[in-house]
Image (cartoon, helix red, strand yellow):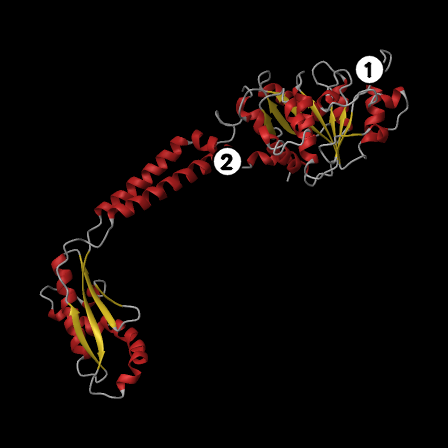
Amino acid sequence: MHPSESHDTLTPQRVVRILWRRKLVCLTVAAVVFLGGAAYLLTRPRIYESSSSVALLPVSNNAAILPNYPNLIASLIPTYVQLVSSSALLNQVAGTLPFRISANELANDVFAESLSNAAVINIVGVSPDPVRAQQIAAATTSVFLAQLRGNGVVVARVYSRPTVPGQPSSPRTKLLLGVILIMAVALGLAAGLIWDRLFGHGEEGDLPAERATGPPVLGVVRDPQQVSVVGAIRAGTEDTVVQDGWQSLRTNFLYALLGQQMHSVTVISAAPGPAKTTVAAGLAAAVAEMGIAVVLVDADVRRSRLHEIFSLDNGQGLTSTVLDGAEPAALLRPVPAITGLQVVTAGPALPAQRDEASLYREQLPRLTGLADLVIVDGPSLHGDMDAGLVARLTDGVVLVVPSELLTWKQVGATVRELTSSGARVLGTVLTGMGSTADSVRP
């Protein structure tokens, strides 16, 4: 999947934002479903049930029946249940009732049910009229008893006669209203998500057009001064990389790399500030804790900060490759508390006559094969001509966006500039005080 497709990924936070944005659709659909279901329920006629219980006893004067009675009655019960609903029996019942009704109509008003592990059949009559329900059950019971009389196998005895019911058996209004309410809420929420999927792209309140068509937001770092997060990782504090969005950033970043054969990524910023280096350090530490060998390179030689974050000596670093002829592999500094993470600091400042562009062009390619993944803390795009060069020398770019300084229009222009120069932008990381990715001004 292309990284830009991750815009369609539904996270819990995004689902909540969508539902809030489409609350009118959700409420409308939920109200229509609930009111429609409630109206149908409340206008349905009440149904009354009246029943009799008939016990099937063995014929006492038939000695052959008694030993086999349990097995025999188990095979006969289904037959007797079907007999109650048979056309022949219902024709007789219809003829004995004090009101006109056909056998076909009566088939909807009579049924029988057997009690488990007992030779008992309940004969039930149903009707919107409680008196008719009792009359149907009584007439059906009488005809059923007549059908079984003298069969030589069982004797039918009524031990519970049908009575006129005082309360309807259905509908169970409170229970069904609760079910309808749950269905209405579920359908309302689904309608909001579907509406947003079909008609919501680019609308006000959703992602701005520049963002919707650009690279995905990989994560949010609320406080760009979070050097303490990396310090806590170095100290071995548990559960630190999952704080403040680092786990989410790591997951989205690795997802963006899937299937793309990328081994080096530059982290650059659209504006000056400490956020870029903080993101590069935190991302490298989080990825390394997944068991991936990571080399973090400080390529911002004018404003180097990685050695401060990791408390490393900056006497030798990237610039030493041209100042002293040092081999890149000899410059790797392990971070003790984070297995798999090694850092190449910026090194001593270059003399004024030295060209930084040639340093990047000649030395960065030599570093990209030293680990599974090389993350480069590049110069800021603001006022630094070499930032675009560093971005092009690696396989991909993560753009750090200070949400309090930039608009999505400016971000879109920066992304287009990087893309036109040959860089591959994987996504953006938002920094600042905003709590969500929507904190960048439209």
- Residue linked to disc 1: 349
Report the side of 18 relative to 416 (left or right): left
User: Which mark is nearer the camera, 2 or 1?
Assistant: 1
Q: Which quarter of the picture shows residue 245? A: top right
Q: Quadrant of the N terminus?
A: top right
Badge 2 density bin: few <14, some 14–19, many ≥20, Cα 10 Å: few
- Residue linked to disc 2: 12
The foreground one among 301 and 357 is 301
Residue drawn where x is 57% and y is 17% of the image: 404
Expressed as whole percent of the image width and height from the top left, the position of residue 313 reads 79, 21
Element at label 1: loop
The foreground one among 190 and 435 is 435
Expressed as whole percent of the image width and height from the top left, the position of residue 60 reads 20, 84
Q: Which quarter of the picture shows residue 288? A: top right
Report the side of 23 relative to 254 (left or right): left
- The number of numbered badges drawn on the structure is 2
Q: Is residue 101 visible?
A: no
